[in-house]
Image: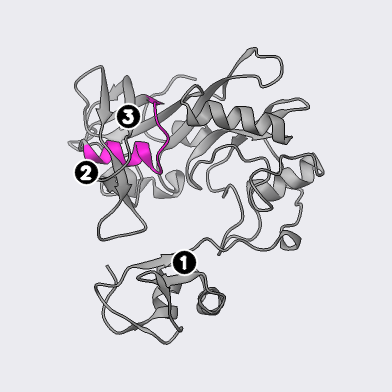
Amino acid sequence: MPGNNVRLDVYVAEREGITRSASQKLIESGYVLVNGIHREKRYSVKAEDEIEVIECPPCETDIKPENIPLDILYEDDCLLVVNKPKGMVVHPAAGNPDGTLVNALLYHCAGTLSGIGGAVRPGIVHRIDKDTSGLLLVAKNDAAHVVLSEQFSSHKMERIYETIVSGNIKDDCGTVNAPIGRHPSNRKKMAVVATGKDAVTHYKVAERYPPQNGGQSYTRLSVRLETGRTHQIRVHMSYIGHPVLGDTVYGGDKSVIAKKYASVLRGQCLHARTIEFEHPITHRIMSFDSGLPDYFYELPFKIEK
């Protein structure tokens, strides 16, 4: 919730993690709404105000191809399966104009990407958070994009994540069925709310790690998404009292391990490990498994490769 008597440009800069000049540019360009209307940069934000920053991507000419190495598991004339590293933003946005997956794809594909996502999200069928690693599906043409997006929206595309959460989950498997929407007081967060959209997360215990030196126990999970809400796994795990290790937004950064290994985790310990879908042209079932990234093995848990 905003504090009283803070200038709008200062508040937006601090909340979005951008410079004040960038914040002012967003406001002056009409991309910031206060209670649904535009305000000047000098406007004093009140506690009850709802501030919305409309995503303001750079124009098409600002998005430049960049020769950034990509970990490509599969590629043909229709699509790519890319293993995104932790820390890489999927597409350009305010505060992240370059160094993104889209910049790398523009260089690698040299113009052969679907245009359905617009100039800022060419080829992007679905996305994962900056600090989540793992597999993403990219469409090279509009026809493939339409088919793959339909599979995604109708939950025909199977995605399995691996994560380590705080605490000992006693049941070997379970389901969290709880609606997710915007947090009522912090609009940058999601939360389980009665007015939210249906969200279903299935999990299965892969391994349990007992307390070390009298500390906390942890559980490694294999997680299957039935729906695809923003921050779904992170919100649901926090909701049941087992936040994702290292998650600075939903309470997973409080434990001794999270603090000690913060430089290894660099955010939530969450990896999109497998993806399965029907190929848009051949109709073959395609399944890919990236394995676990190195940062899982750098934590003080015994994980077999």
Label 2, residues with CA under 10 Å away: few <14, some 14-19, many ≥20: few
Q: Position of residue 62 (x, y in %)?
A: 72, 63
Sequence-first disc among 1 and 2: 1
In the image, farthest residue toward the front: 37
Per the rendering, the mark at residue 54 is none
**Region rendered in magenta:** 223-239
Question: Residue placed at 49% from the left, 31% from the top?
Answer: 153
Query: Which residue is tagged 3?
Result: 200
Q: Distance between the Cα atoms at labels 1 and 2?
A: 30 Å
Q: Secondary structure at mark 2?
A: loop
> Which residue is identified by label 2?
194
Mark-to-mark CA distance, 2 and 3? 14 Å
**Lateral position of residue 287 relative to residue 45, left or right:** right
Q: Which mark is residue 17?
A: 1
Contact, mark 3 vs mark 1 (Cβ under 8 Å): no
Q: Which amino acid is tagged 1?
A: Gly
Q: Quadrant of the N terminus?
A: bottom left
Give the secondary structure at mark 3: strand
Nearest to N terminus: mark 3 or mark 1: 1
Question: Tags 2 and 3 in contact by the CB under 8 Å rule?
Answer: no
Q: Give the amino acid type for the residue marked by disc 2 in the picture.
A: Ala
Picture residue at 50% right of the left edge, 41% below the top = 128
Q: Nearer the viewer, residue 183 or 88?
A: 183
Magenta stretch encompasses residue 226:
yes
Q: Quadrant of residue 228?
A: top left
In reply to whether residue 240 is colored magenta, the answer given is no
